[in-house]
Structure formats: C-alpha cells, structure tokens
Image (cartoon, rainbow, N blue to C red):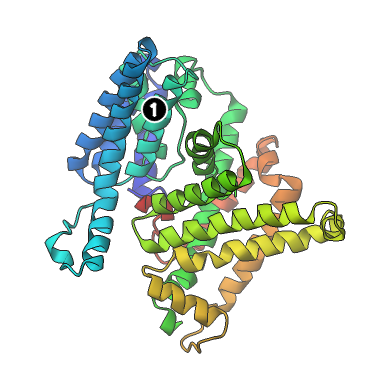
Amino acid sequence: MLFNSFQYWIFFLIVAVLFYSMPFRIGKLLLLCASYVFYMWWDPRFIVLILTSTVVDYFLGIWLEVTSGGRKKLLLAVSLVVNLGFLGFFKYYDFFAGSLAGLFHIPKSSVVLQVVLPVGISFYTFASLSYTLDVYWGKMKAVRNFVDYALFIAFFPHLIAGPIIRARQFISQIQYWRWPAAIVIQSGIILVLSGLLKKMVFADRFAVVSDSYFRDPAAHRQRWHITLSTWVRDYLFMPFSRGRKGRFVLYRNMLVVMVLVGLWHGANWTFVAWGAYHGLLLVGYRLFDRATVGTAIDRVMRQRWFVPFSVGLMFACFVLSAAFFRPKTLQTTGYVLSALFGFQHVTGEFLLTTGTIVLLFISLFLAAAQERNQFIDRLALQPARVQIPAYVCAFLVLELFPATGPVPFVYFQF
C-alpha cells in the first residue's frame, strides 16, 4: 500500500474518522490494529518479526530500569542481539554469504538463501533500539503500557518508509494526548499536500530520467535524512567517541559510521562505497577547514558573495554520490563515472523532454521561494478564501499532472 496511492488514502481516512469518533483509550487500540493490518497487507508472515521485537524490548525496557551492574549490560546485549540479529539475517545474510562465496570461489547458489527482506525492518529496528538504549542510559523511563509501546513501534504512517522516530518524542504525545487545534490540522493538510505535489508531480517525473539512466547507462548532511543522521549521531558516533581524544579517532569514527550508514541503506557494495565516499567528504572538509583557518582562503570563503559557490560545490559533491547510490553494481558505478567525466562515449535517447526541463525550473523556483518566504508554512495562517482555492489547485495539479503510475518511495526498500 503506497502512500501516494488512492488505496492508502481511503484506508487513512477510514482510520482517522473512526479514531476521532471514539474515546482515546479505545482509539489507541484501533490505531495499533490498523497498523498491524497495514503491515500485513504486504506479507502477513512477517508480522511475527515486529511482534517479537516489540514484546522482547517492552519487557527488557522495564527490566533495564530496575536493574544495575553487569546484569543491566547483559539485558542490553540481549536487545542488541535480537534486533540486530533479525536485521542482520534478513537484510545482510545473502550479501555477506554471496561476497564470501565469491572470495573463496564457492558457487553462490550453495550458500545464498534468497531471503526476502521484510518491509520497514530497518526503521522499526532502529526505533526499538533507540528506546532500549535511552532507558539503559537513563534518558527516559520505561513504558509500562504495552499498547503505548507497541503503537510506537508499529504506527503505520512511519512504519515502512520512515522517519525513524524516538520513543521520547512519540510516547509523550500518547501519554499527554489532546485534540489537535484547527491550526495544527490545517498545517498538517498543507504539509501532506505539498509533499504529495513534490513526490507525484515533480519527483516521479524526474525519476523517469534518473531511473532509466542508472538502470542502463549505456542506453542513456543533515537535511538529507535528518532522523537517520541524528540517530547515527546519538547512538553510534557519540558513544564511539565518548572518552576518546585526538583528531585521528574523530576522523576514523566519522569514516566508520558513514560506512555503516551506507550499509544501512542496502546490502550491496555500492552502498558501502557510497558511505565511504561521504565519510571521506566529511573528513576532507574537516582537514581543509582546519588547514585554512585564519588564511586568506578562509576570509574569502566567509564572504556573503561566496556562499552560492560553496553551496554549489557541496551540492555537486552530493549529486556525484548518486553514481554509487543508484546503480546495482560497482561495475555500473564505474561506467556512470567514466561517462560523467567524459572518459567514455555514451549514446542513446535523450530523456530530458521539454516538459521535464520546464518542471525542473518550476521546482527550483518554488524551492527558492519556500526557502526565502516560507509561503507553504504561512498558508495555514491565511483565511478560508485563500486556503480553499489553494487546496483545489493542489488537487487539480495532482490529478492533471501525475507520472505514468505510482512510483514507490526510495526508502520503501529499507
């Protein structure tokens, strides 16, 4: 059930109407049942995994709060083994087994199991681990209400494509729930509509070009993923760096963590290379910044007129990483890079149509206008005579200018 499908919004509206028509205590049960139905819509078999992870970490969280010493560390280890064990087997077994088979010249068919990747397992695993780690470090109290905790793990709007939510943020909203104000509802509607417009009208059309190119090239960091980057910072980078001094340790941890971030995105050497690329970018930036402090280069780079150049350079470096992220093999990555830098002649159909180019410039204009004036955020404050025509226009655009068919979100595969 894709978020940009008619089927999903029928499901969402039914759940929302039922939820707001009953007492909150019963409404929580409705949301939990709806979330499990939503997850089983893809494959009912894998509901066992999310239920197991939920039950194990619910009880471990309570025991972690009342235990100390070595036993507390053992309980945390159980949580790590269960959650990372599920994630490691279903997401990475075939990858590592196949890589080792190739290294030792063993037929891959004899070791690879063709394991099906449960949808959303990376997201709910990280969410669950953030809870047990926060309880272990004393950053939050253990949740005693099982429905509250189960809903935190399985809440369907974030379950299969993110973002990675934290228990501290979500549980408090359940425990102190109140009816949303009208301005909050209006802001939510505007955010949803603007997101659908970006996805269905702009991104899906641009995907026609990018997917075709990366599928067959011969024929043709914090905003990037803010919940993942903050999770990595709080639960990987900071614990690894705590109590350790020295620039070498800092740079090493940056590189290692970014490689792990790349591996989180997918069980493929292209993602490992993608993570290493970003790790080297971070380390290179730190080294350059340290080497130029107080120099003429530093003074020039701090000038306001230089900002577009620095932003453009970083954007170009980020876009270059798509050569690692989108292809399926390192060989294809090499082909893309050689073609990009002119080392290899590429022939084929020109996919950038006039309509796509016009849409690209419209999207750039709207992005700059939003960054400068926040016109989308301010729409919620406008009177009905302004909001209603805006909603009508949004629905008309979604109806008149969609892509050829529903295109899945990139993060559905994680």
Q: Residue at x 48, y 56 (%)?
A: 275
Q: Which residue is mark 1?
A: 152
Look at the picture and state if 214 lies above or below 115.
below
The single residue placed furthest to the left in the displayed view is: 110
- For the residue pair 113 and 349, the one nearer the viewer reads as 113
Q: Residue 277: x, y in percent?
A: 52, 61
- For the residue pair 121 and 408, the one nearer the viewer reads as 121
Circle 1 residues within 10 Å: few <14, some 14–19, many ≥20: many
Look at the picture and state if 71 lies above or below 285.
above
On screen, residue 102 versus residue 298, left or right, reads left
Q: Residue 102: x, y in percent?
A: 24, 67
Q: Quadrant of residue 150?
A: top left
Q: Residue 300: x, y in percent?
A: 86, 59
Looking at the rendered structure, the secondary structure element under dot 1 is helix
Q: Quadrant of residue 120?
A: top left
- For the residue pair 244 and 287, the one nearer the viewer reads as 244
Q: Quadrant of residue 146?
A: top left
On screen, residue 327 versus residue 307, left or right, reads left
The amino acid on which the numbered mark 1 sits, given as a three-letter code, is Phe
